[in-house]
Amino acid sequence: MKYVSTRGARNLGSFCDVLLLGLAPDGGLAMPESIPTLSPDEVEALRGLSYPELAYAVMRPFITDIPGDDLKRLLEQTYRAEVFGSPEITPLTPLGDSGLYLLELSNGPSLAFKDMAMQFLGQVFEYVLETRNERLNILGATSGDTGSAAEYAMLGKARVNVFMLSPHGRMSAFQQAQMFSLREPNIFNIAVQGVFDDCQDLVKAVNADAEFKERFEIGAVNSINWARVLAQAVYYFKGYFALGLPAGAEADFCVPSGNFGNVFAGHLARAMGLPIGQLVVASNENDVLHEFFTTGTYHVRPAARVAMTSSPSMDIGKASNFERYLYLITGGSGTQTLSWWQEVGEGRPVSLAGTPHWDTVKASRFAAGRSTHADRLSTIREVDTEFGRLIDPHTADGVFVARPHQRVGVPMVCLETALPIKFEDTVKEAVGRSPERPTKFGGIETLERQFTVLDNDVDALKAFVAGKLAEQR
């Protein structure tokens, strides 16, 4: 399998090449030349596989440059009960007889769904770098959960440094503590004076400097990294099979989404042949995705208009992975995708309404909704009261948006995105008590924190990275 850029560049190489690449040289995102499809019988043949076996079956067509036995070993090392709490890895829990289900994705080391892909990245980065005798300096941006998931996955990885940008003062206290309390020689936390989109733009700006990127061996773990999207597609298959539906029967999925990576993984699984009906995108007050899927206009929010909400991991005004979706609806036209993304970069809205591309969007069976702080609180309270299940505010966004999109006789799977302890203040506001806290995280907010505050300035960031790497030599 070879990879290309969403903006037209060809021959990006194979999986291991794009794993280490981050952004393509033209600023686009890596995509496979084609998406392998499974027949209904081939999909059914996957039913009953263990999680590592299922991951191998789903991912192998996209990863042809790692020997099969090695890939199986990496997946077995990644998806273990000791890491994720149970052999199921992603248990499926019905919410009574409501027709709603929670797909539990937050039982990994950092208590967020990002672990599902990031733990694999930690294994495969180490494997590829050792095979090639190379090093990698990961530059990433987080709105809350990617950072801790990446840092936990890269602990002790001798060939990897992590430089993680986060918006200063805009994460929960627990999220900050998870990242900033780590005192590892290969982990560098950078709090940027700005919002998540500023952090994301800084990462892209550094990647766009080809000379700097090559000289300092810069890579990425954000959902711009294809390996993350691919790994996330696996749990859609796992969740679907756990429903026990007859062969070919549809299931709908609702996904809290800010950067579009998690829900795009569902779109990938559906394109491969998994019988997913609707993919429902749940937004908070930062509703750029909701606006697109309901009006046909994609209008990026500048930093000043990105609201600070009680589901902060979705406080995003520009969804990076949305570029992959636009690329697919064009039929793989890098020229058209580049044109649209140039408009986005200039702050102009892109409107597809009334065009053939909008017909393609509508045919792709996406739906969308948004929720507010009050909606989150009431949903957390209702799910706790009705079903005895405490959920975090992002998962509450999903449950709230899912309900009006339910179809009679069709299960609706809501993707859990984090354990409620990561957002203790909001959950306590909703139900009047603190959520259960895993023992290993007792008192984490009181630990000494180590981080550096930087202005929203790419030159300052480059100087910081270069300085820290010089100190290691």
Image (spheres, rainbow, N blue to C red):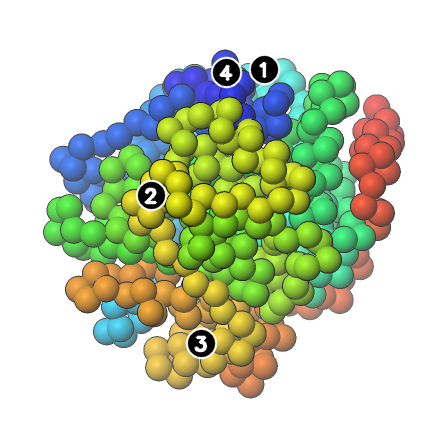
Residue visible at 23% across and 32% down?
38
Decide: few, some or many residues near mark 2? Use Cα within 10 Å; few <14, some 14-19, many ≥20: some
Q: Name the mark on residue 132.
A: 1
Task: State which tag comes first along the sequence, 2 or 3.
Answer: 2
Which residue position is annotated with label 4? 10
Asked if the residues shown at circle 2 and circle 3 are in contact, with their CB atoms under 8 angstroms apart, the answer is no
What's the CA distance linking mark 3 and mark 1? 49 Å
Q: From the viewer's perspective, is the residue at label 3 or at label 1 nearer?
A: 3
Q: Are marks 1 and 4 in contact (CB under 8 Å)?
A: no
x, y percent for residue 336: 49, 29
Q: Quadrant of the N terminus?
A: top left
The residue that label 3 is drawn on is 379
In this rendering, is residue 264 above or below 371? above
Disc 4 residue type? Arg
Q: Residue furthest front?
A: 354
Within 10 Å of disc 4 (Cα), the crowding (few <14, some 14-19, many 20+) is: some
Nearer the observer, disc 2 or disc 3?
2
N-terminal of the pair, mark 1 or mark 2, is 1
**Residue 284 can be seen in this image:** yes
